[in-house]
Every structure is written in C-alpha cells, then in structure tokens.
Image (spheres, helix red, strand yellow):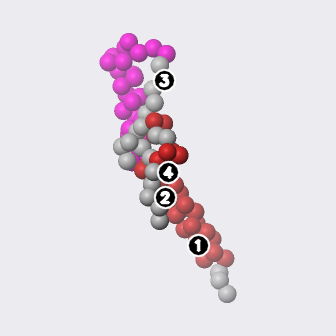
Amino acid sequence: MEHKGAARRSSGVRHLFCILTESYEAATLTHLGRNGSPEDIAKVVAFLLSSDAAFITGASIVADGGYTGVDYYVKKENEPLG
C-alpha cells in the first residue's frame, strides 16, 4: 500500500517536470534561447531610471528576449517530425 505522502511527492515531481518542460519550451522560442531572469528586468528598470533615458517618454519597453517576435505556429510547422 502506497503512503499518502509518497503519492503527494509523486504528484509534485510530475508538476515540477511540467513546469520545467514548459520553461524549456518557452526558452527555445526566444531569439536568445533562454528565459529571462529578474536581473534582466532590473537592468531595463535601472536604465529607465537613469539620465540616459531622459528623452524617453510614453514608450512601451518590451524586455522579453525576442519572444513576442516569434511566430510560434510557423516555428512548430518547420520542426522536423519524429
């Protein structure tokens, strides 16, 4: 008979595997080939707070490693089968 804690751990491992798989897939869709880190966003914020960004007003800054520039469906269609 399986202990309840063992079933919970097994479920947690599956959940973690799904998160890691989704994270890996998302990373492969960026031009940089990796997920962003908090430090990546912090650098953008630091720039915007600096005097170097003094002429930037009312702009949307996208810091996503190129993710929004990828056509996911075209990328999937061009992957080799099997």
Q: Nearer the viewer, mark 4 or mark 3?
A: 4
Asked whether the residues under the numbered discs 2 and 1 touch, taking CB atoms below 8 Å apart as contact, a structural biologist would say no
Tell me the element at label 2.
helix
- The residue carrying mark 4 is 76
Q: Amino acid at mark 2?
A: Leu
- The residue carrying mark 1 is 10
The answer to whether 27 is drawn above or below residue 62 in the figure is below
The residue range painted magenta reads 34-58
Please tell me whether the stretch drawn in magenta is mainly helix, strand or loop. Answer: helix
- The residue carrying mark 2 is 20
Q: Amino acid at mark 3?
A: Ser
Residue located at (39% from left, 22% from top): 49
State the image coordinates of residue 46 (x, y, percent, origin top left): 37, 28
Sooner in the amino-acid sequence: mark 2 or mark 1: 1
Q: Is residue 58 left or right of residue 10?
A: left
State the image coordinates of residue 69 (x, y, percent, origin top left): 45, 36
